[in-house]
Image (tube, rainbow, N blue to C red):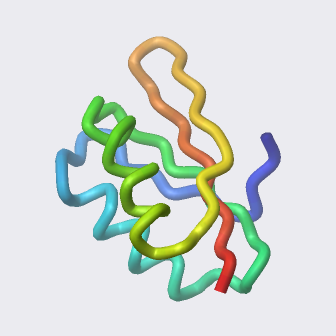
């Protein structure tokens, strides 16, 4: 998936990937897609839950070799 911006959260553990995502989202325009790259398995549950609470769109998740790539669209 093509993202407008990418956020490297490798080596960060809960709740830091979500906190960094919140900060990065402030810089995005509505409709832009953020790719979050993490190695904390907690992001598998945390990011979909964050999207549900905030109303942003959870698009997809890909895993390869310990890296988890999550794609989220800013909706408002």
Residue 39 location (% of width, % of height) = 34, 32
Pick the front one: 28 or 49: 49
Q: Is residue 37 left or right of residue 39?
A: right
Quadrant in the rendering for residue 66: top left
> Eyeballing the image, is 18 above or below 56?
above
Look at the image and tell me in which quarter the N terminus lies: top right
The one of 56 and 22 positioned closer to us in this rendering: 56
Viewed as shown, does residue 54 lie left or right of 71?
A: left
Return the residue nearer the eye: 53 or 26: 53
What is the x, y in percent for residue 40? Answer: 27, 35
Q: Residue at x 40, y 69 (%)?
A: 53
Q: Is residue 28 above or below residue 14?
A: below
Residue drawn at the location 34% of the way across and 40% of the way down = 45
Q: Is residue 31 above or below residue 33?
A: below
Q: Give the left or right position of residue 16, taking residue 74 as reference.
A: left
Q: How many marks?
A: 0
Please state the horizontal and vertical placement of residue 21, each as a whole percent of the image. Answer: 42, 67
Residue in the picture at 75% in, 71% down: 32
What residue lies at 46% left-to-right and 12% top-to-bottom?
A: 65
Quadrant location of the C terminus in the rendered image? bottom right
Instruction: Say left or right for 6 vs 52.
Output: right
Q: Residue furthest left?
A: 14
Picture coordinates of residue 67 (x, y %)?
45, 26
């Amino acid at each position: 998936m093509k993202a407008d911006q990418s956020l490297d959260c490798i080596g960060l553990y809960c709740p830091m990937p979500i906190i960094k995502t919140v900060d990065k989202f402030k810089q995005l325009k509505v409709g832009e897609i953020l790719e979050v790259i993490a190695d904390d398995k907690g992001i598998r549950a945390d990011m979909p839950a964050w999207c549900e609470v905030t109303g942003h769109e959870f698009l997809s998740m890909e895993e390869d070799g310990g890296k988890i790539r999550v794609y989220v669209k800013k909706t408002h």
